[in-house]
């Protein structure tokens, strides 16, 4: 989470979101116009009325899609995630335009317009977004970052910071809790402060207070209990203000709506996906000996164990010698077809059956095996809270992180999902799953170094 406090000597500012949205709308409509002109040479009179009806609707859909894809949020991860979201947004706009034209039956033009318009739109939007990203980076300026926390948490934070594009952050100093008395000395040199590990409450309050007094931006990697408190509400006992910690379980109404949404979407997707599933079943069968479907026990809603189904992506008896282990980056147990299926997430198509059975939801924390759950709960007692909702095919940890994201960070995302659940959040995660499919790194296994940090008993 980030706590922003603008002013003082820190270079701050931003391009208004409404201006960014207006330019997006203009370019989307301009791309559609260019496609009409490119195909027909000019707009015919009888085409103007339905086109004028489509343009305002396209503007609304553009803002809704782009907003839920995170295109109006602060971007600190480089331009590639923006590009993936733009591609997803343009695909969504194209599908909407096709459905609108089919529904109204008012358009009389060559259907190639719907193939050409996305190319114009994407070209215009990419050019604009490159300009916008560079402007935002220039306006914000490079942040000189002072990082505070214990060695393990700081190492993980620095590893992520080093992956960001140059020019976003420059780490000027790392302070461990034992050296927190040096904080006041280093604060004037910094533009922002990151608390990347547990600090005593008094020390954390001091860091935030002095940072605000100096008009510095503050980033906090939250403790697990702090995420749980996001569901808390301010109230009072007599005249004393108190924070009431509410039950994290979702309500019966939310469960009913979520189940209805799951069944509807699973039935809609299952029928067109069936031919694709049969093709990949055949490919798995022809390229690797053994069963096509892989079945494995996973821990689900309220710690109930169920059988999860996937297309097999590894050789038979892959864990015969090693026992339960996570997949690594260059895992030689994965078959050639399996690598493709994993990269595109198509190996998870059989899990639609789990959704229909009620084992899984479309969106939720990814289910883990009993062996891993037992070890995670021993290390992190809060881990059991993620089982207060049904596990899902996709989830917040999957769209915001990667397969190789460490378990603590994944749990932070899962607990935030549980504590702040809504059907709208499910929709947003589902939408954000699409650009994730274009990200090969999202499905890459653990590095050998990360695997080595898991010191569980065999």
Image: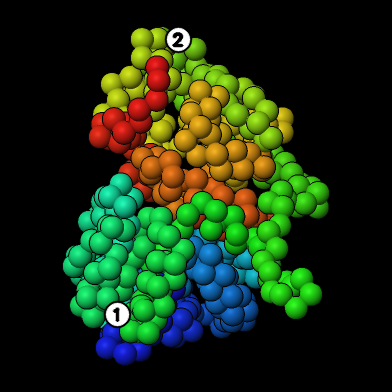
Residue ID for mark 2: 290
Residue 314, quarter of picture: top left
Residue 410 lies, in percent from the top left, at: 46, 45
Q: Residue at x 40, y 59 (%)?
A: 199
- Seen from the viewer's position, the closer of residues 353 and 121 is 353
Q: Is 23 located above or below residue 419 in the figure?
A: below
Q: Is residue 350 left or right of residue 423?
A: left
Q: Residue at x 62, y 22 (%)?
A: 307
Is residue 407 visible to us here? Answer: yes
Sequence-first disc among 1 and 2: 1
From the top left corner, tell me how far across and down residue 218 is, in percent. Answer: 38, 72
Residue 169: quarter of image: bottom left
Question: Does residue 353 sit above or below 438 in this rendering?
Answer: above
- Out of 233 and 427, give the one closest to the viewer: 233
Left or right? Give the position of 347 relative to 105: left
Q: Which mark is residue 420?
A: none
Residue drawn at x 34%, y 65% is 194
Q: Residue 95 placed where, x, y %?
A: 55, 59
How many marks on residues?
A: 2
Q: Nearer the viewer, mark 1 or mark 2?
A: 1
- Between the C-alphas of marks 1 and 2, the distance is 55 Å
Q: Is residue 103 visible?
A: no
Which class describes the residues within 10 Å of circle 2: few (<14), some (14-19), or many (20+)?
A: some
Residue bearing mark 1? 140
Q: Nearer the viewer, residue 95 or 232?
A: 232
Q: Residue at x 72, y 33 (%)?
A: 358
Q: Residue 256, percent across and down?
A: 79, 47
């Amino acid at each position: 989470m980030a706590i922003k406090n603008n002013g003082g000597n820190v270079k701050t500012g931003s391009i208004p979101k409404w201006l960014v949205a207006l330019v997006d709308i203009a370019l989307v409509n301009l791309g559609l116009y260019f496609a009409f002109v490119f195909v027909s040479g000019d707009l015919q009179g009888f085409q103007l009325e339905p086109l004028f009806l489509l343009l305002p609707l396209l503007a609304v859909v553009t803002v809704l899609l782009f907003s839920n894809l995170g295109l109006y949020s602060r971007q600190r991860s480089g331009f590639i995630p923006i590009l993936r979201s733009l591609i997803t947004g343009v695909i969504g706009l194209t599908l909407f335009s096709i459905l609108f034209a089919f529904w109204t039956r008012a358009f009389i033009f060559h259907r190639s317009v719907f193939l050409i318009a996305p190319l114009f739109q994407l070209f215009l939007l990419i050019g604009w977004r490159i300009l916008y990203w560079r402007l935002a980076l220039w306006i914000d300026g490079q942040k000189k970052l002072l990082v505070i926390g214990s060695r393990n948490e700081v190492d993980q934070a620095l590893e992520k910071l080093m992956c960001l594009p140059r020019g976003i952050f420059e780490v000027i100093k790392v302070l461990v809790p034992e050296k927190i008395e040096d904080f006041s000395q280093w604060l004037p040199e910094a533009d922002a402060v990151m608390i990347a590990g547990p600090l005593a409450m008094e020390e954390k309050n001091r860091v935030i207070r002095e940072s605000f007094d100096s008009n510095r931006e503050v980033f906090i990697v939250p403790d697990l209990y702090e995420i749980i408190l996001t569901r808390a509400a301010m109230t009072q006992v007599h005249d004393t203000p108190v924070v009431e910690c509410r039950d994290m379980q979702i309500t019966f109404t939310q469960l009913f709506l979520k189940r209805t949404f799951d069944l509807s979407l699973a039935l809609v997707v299952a029928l067109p996906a069936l031919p694709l599933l049969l093709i990949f079943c055949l490919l798995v069968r022809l390229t690797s000996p053994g069963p096509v479907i892989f079945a494995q026990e996973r821990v689900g809603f309220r710690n109930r164990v169920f059988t999860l189904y996937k297309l097999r992506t590894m050789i038979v008896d892959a864990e015969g010698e090693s026992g339960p282990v996570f997949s690594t980056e260059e895992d030689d147990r994965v078959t050639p077809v399996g690598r493709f299926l994993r990269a595109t997430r198509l190996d998870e198509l059989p899990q639609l059956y789990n959704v229909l059975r009620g084992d899984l939801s479309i969106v939720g924390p990814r289910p883990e095996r009993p062996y891993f759950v037992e070890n995670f709960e021993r290390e992190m007692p809060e881990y059991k809270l993620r089982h207060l909702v049904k596990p899902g095919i996709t989830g917040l940890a999957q769209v915001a992180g990667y397969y190789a994201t460490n378990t603590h960070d994944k749990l932070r995302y899962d607990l935030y999902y549980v504590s702040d659940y809504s059907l709208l959040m499910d929709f947003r995660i589902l939408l954000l799953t699409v650009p994730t499919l274009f990200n090969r790194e999202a499905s890459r296994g653990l590095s050998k170094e990360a695997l080595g940090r898991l010191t569980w008993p065999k």
